[in-house]
Amino acid sequence: MQTLLENLNPEQLAAVTLPPQHALILAGAGSGKTRVLTTRIAWLIQTGQVSPAGVLAVTFTNKAAKEMMSRLSAMLPINTRGMWIGTFHGLCNRLLRAHYRDAGLPQTFQILDSADQLSMIKRMLKALNVDDEKYPPRNLMYFINNAKEQGLRARDVEVNDDYNRKFVELFEFYDNQCQREGVVDFAELLLRTYELLTRNQPLREHYQGRFRHILVDEFQDTNNLQYNWLKLIAGKGNAVFAVGDDDQSIYAFRGANVGNMIAFEREFNVQNLIKLEQNYRSHGHILDSANTLIANNSKRLGKNLRTDAGHGEQVRVYEASSDIQEAQWIIEQVKSLIGEGMLRSEIAVLYRSNAQSRVIEHSLFNSGIPYRVYGGQRFFERAEIKHAIAYLQLMDNPHNDSAFLRVVNFPTRGIGAKSIEQLQDAAKQYGISLYAAVPYVAGKAGTSLGGFVKLVEAMRFETQQLPLQELVKVMLEMSGLIPHYQTEKEGADRIENLEQLVSAAMLFVSEEGYGIDTPAYLGPKAAAASGPALLTEDGVEIIDADTPLAAVMSPLSAFLSHASLEAGDNQAQAGQDALQLMTVHSAKGLEFDAVFITGLEEGLFPHENSAQEEGGVEEERRLMYVAITRAKKRLYITFSQTRMLHGQTRYNMKSRFFDELPEHALKWLSPKAQQHHWFGLKSQSAWDEAPEAAANSIAQSFSNKVGNWRIGESVSHAKFGEGVIVNLEGSGANMRAHINFGKHGMKLLDLNIAKLEKLAPRLGH
DNA sequence: GAAAACCAATTTTTT
DNA sequence: ATTGGTTTTC
């Protein structure tokens, strides 16, 4: 107990030991948010205010949930496995498995990931002969997800016009199709649970009576449905402890609503609002930069980070002549940091969009510095794994049409487009799944399709008594996946991945507390007989927090959920000490000794698309705030005069965010060679290491000069402010320039009339 | 049924 | 420039 609360600062201590009432904790970056959350849970349990079963902790990512679990098990002498700590989706899945009948779902319902959902929508549009130019599948998907996130079904959506009406119609059809197939998308997991608890009073009251303390991480990222879901579970008497940071809300584009923080304060009549403003991560200059920048946002809840760490070093700002040179400069700096003894894994290079990583990766590859790029394709998203999963899905629930179509002819078994068409017609006619429609297809197509059905049934039969990992092994052989990749030239890697799937299954079984020999199909009932029994209250089946997963899901169903809900690591070279490359978004929640924020240019960061969106620039600013606050000791911000994007050279102005940073905290650097002496000075230029790039730049600079002016040059105009010359035309008395003035847009100016000043790159003091 | 040719799109991302 | 998806061709 004493040790639990030791070393907490006064605000943290106050938050951890709040009375059992609603509370909103405004936790700034690096203020010990996760620590407060986990210590709060441990304290509640240790002081006997709540039993482990009475705690519900919700996070957004599996990573965060795992982190919380492991910290908790270090603090408490209890088994945390049974505790209800997880993502919104994970917890809903668990609830729906336990109450599948009440929720109107088949026991083996399966979860569609976004890719599955999109392909399902495409398939539906095709089947209904809908013009997918007029009704793009992606838009329909957004429409459906958006409606569900507002808690709306098709019948609840307001219809304004014919176009909208069609969307609603398709939404309804989509939901029916999902129901036929026994599949649910991500939003459906939440909405179904919400509806289940709304409709079913005994069930609702049971859970409300049980979860006395509800803790929510990253509250600023909740969408409306999640907010209402929390409200419902909280009921009247329970305490919601919400932790969040409005300044770090960067997911509005996927439905997150920062307004939920204010709504929470008001609707829950929150009496306990605590701000955690003491930062334990960054040095002073870095923190000053973050604070000054974010002060430019309106509609903040108000918060200012402070540190005891001292000013530390200034933020280094560097102007590069090109994206290639930017990358090379970064690598030089990284080398020198490593030379000073910094770990590579403590250095991060951040960028606004993934496309920017290419150039950096290229230079890194040549320099031989080990690096790891986050955000690539993940394990369960690989094609061969998707195929294997589809077979497993069919074995568990053959009515999953997506799975059916994915593998019905893979490996090829003579079932072509014609056969599939006939089958889809039959399925449509009878309103059943493709699998169920096979007997209605006559002729040759029917025979080959029948063969496929027999295969699936044979696989089920052969694996009835086998544990999960054995089942996967048998499936890989019988389906023909392994034999198929064995004959392929480049199949070795894929086979290796498929073998990893077997290991993943084994690991899953042991981690989730299933017996290593438990048959994979063993249903919840049967499994429960060997574990704690299901409780019954008011005729409602109730699962208990200490009940292992086995009581609600068979190993196979659970594994398939896991594959959908947790796409797995992007498994780069783990374990190695490597430089970290990632988008600013994926850096959220992480920290590094040194951070490079790259591409600070108008159009890139803030991104050009953000200009039109309501509140877009403010979200970009929060994104920059997140980026800055990742750094502990060193922060570098870079931008470039020229950049290749979509195969075209672009000339961007430096980002407006530079004007929003405190001058005293910055140190402006410049390339070794002056950009103005592009020609002839090769030996001492900054491009020594890239003769090719230098040659290109020089060639370009010759053809792109008019009079005294050069494309890419920075200029200043009395009315429009700073800009960059993007294009030059004419000569002598007819010289004109296209100039990108950022906020003021693109202008065409006559160079003999407009009074332009040349802007020299800024140098350090 | 698979390879080649063509064409559009291209911020951020977790579940 | 690159990639993913679709259509055409062998």
Image (tube, coloured by chain):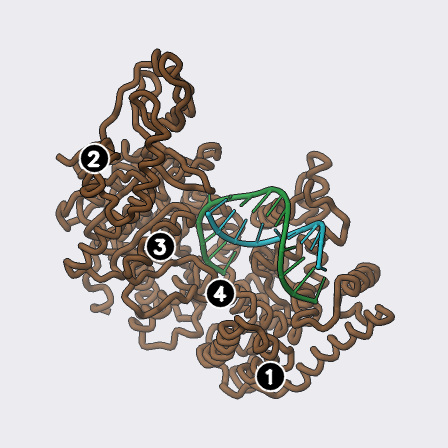
Chain colours: A brown, B green, C cyan
Say whether residue A17 is visible.
Answer: no
Which comes before the other along the chain, label 2 or label 1?
Answer: 1
Residue that carries the numbered disc 4 in the rendered image: A566
Give me the residue at 35% from left, 37% from top: A642
> Decide: marks 2, 1 in contact (CB < 8 A)?
no
Q: Give the number of callouts.
A: 4
Kind of residue at badge 2? Gln
Classify 10 Å Cα crowding around label 4: few (below 14), some (14-19), many (20 and above): some
Left or right: residue A124 versus residue A697 is: right
Q: Which mark is residue A361?
A: 3
Distance between the Cα atoms at labels 1 and 4? 24 Å
> Decide: marks 1, 4 in contact (CB < 8 A)?
no
Distance between the Cα atoms at labels 3 and 4? 27 Å
Give me the residue at 36% from left, 47% from top: A351
Which comes before the other along the chain, label 3 or label 4?
Answer: 3
Whether A316 is drawn above or below A387: the answer is above
Q: Name the foreground residue: A741 vs A12.
A: A741
Classify 10 Å Cα crowding around label 2: few (below 14), some (14-19), many (20 and above): some
Residue that carries the numbered disc 1 in the rendered image: A474
Q: Name the foreground residue: A556 vs A449.
A: A449
Q: Which of the two marks, 3 or 4, is nearer to us in this view?
A: 3
